[in-house]
Image (spheres, grey):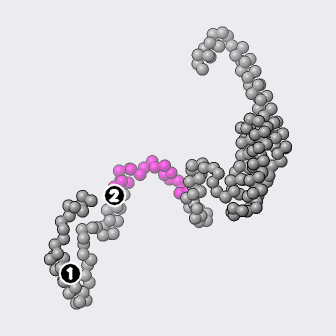
Amino acid sequence: MAEERSRPEPDARVEAARYRVDRDARARGEEVPEASTGRPTMDQRAHVIENAIQQAIRRGEFDDLPGAGKPLPGLTGTHDPDWWIRRKIEREKLTGLGPPALTLRTEHSELDATLDRLGSERAVRDHLADYNRRIVDARRQLQGGPPVVTPTRDIDEEVARWADRRETRAREAEAARRAEAEALAALTRRERRRLRRSR
């Protein structure tokens, strides 16, 4: 804005004279160069930018950039028009986005860990019932997208597996507590005090 204000207003007489000279030159068949309005041409801009890049390279401003010396990701393979959204999902580790076939596959591979975080059999049953319902709905292809190949899970069988994993974790935790108590009992009083202070 300030740059535009500092430019002097073009003189109408000078512009009219330029117009007449250009018109006469065109009438004679001469090539008339474009009138410069004070703005650099594309070639001049490219030259300035290239010079700035070369100077930055000499100063070392492009050294130690992340990914230096590594191939650019995503250049191999077929063209994917949704490459940017896939990369965003991977980078941000977003979940629950995409067609149901893909989200259900991801949920299927992580289902045991999800069930292990639940605290009661009722919660496990409710989660599995909801999971199976979503698979059946997605198989009907009401929302479109790729085919759903994710299998449903047998609720009773999964609850039994969940209970077994829970018992195993409880036994392992109890064994670890016993081992820690035995190790603590084997220490002298001074060593126990020193250990408590370090925690």
Q: Is residue 23 above or below residue 144?
A: below
Q: Quadrant of the N terminus?
A: bottom left
The residue singled out by tag 2 in the image is 52
In the figure, is residue 195 to the left or right of 111? Answer: left
Q: Is residue 133 above or below residue 15?
A: above
Q: Is residue 86 covered in magenta? A: no
Residue at image x 75%, y 21%?
178
Q: Nearer the viewer, residue 160 or 27?
A: 160
The residue singled out by tag 1 in the image is 19
Instruction: Kindly report the secondary structure that dominates the magenta region of the rendered protein.
Output: loop
Residue at image x 75%, y 54%?
135
In the figure, is residue 65 to the left or right of 145? Answer: left
Crowd band around label 1 with a 10 angstrom C-alpha radius: few (<14), some (14–19), many (20+): few
Q: Nearer the viewer, residue 36 or 129?
A: 129
Which dot marks residue 97? Answer: none
Residue at image x 22%, y 83%?
22
**Magenta-highlighted residues:** 54-74
Does residue 150 appear anywhere in the picture? no
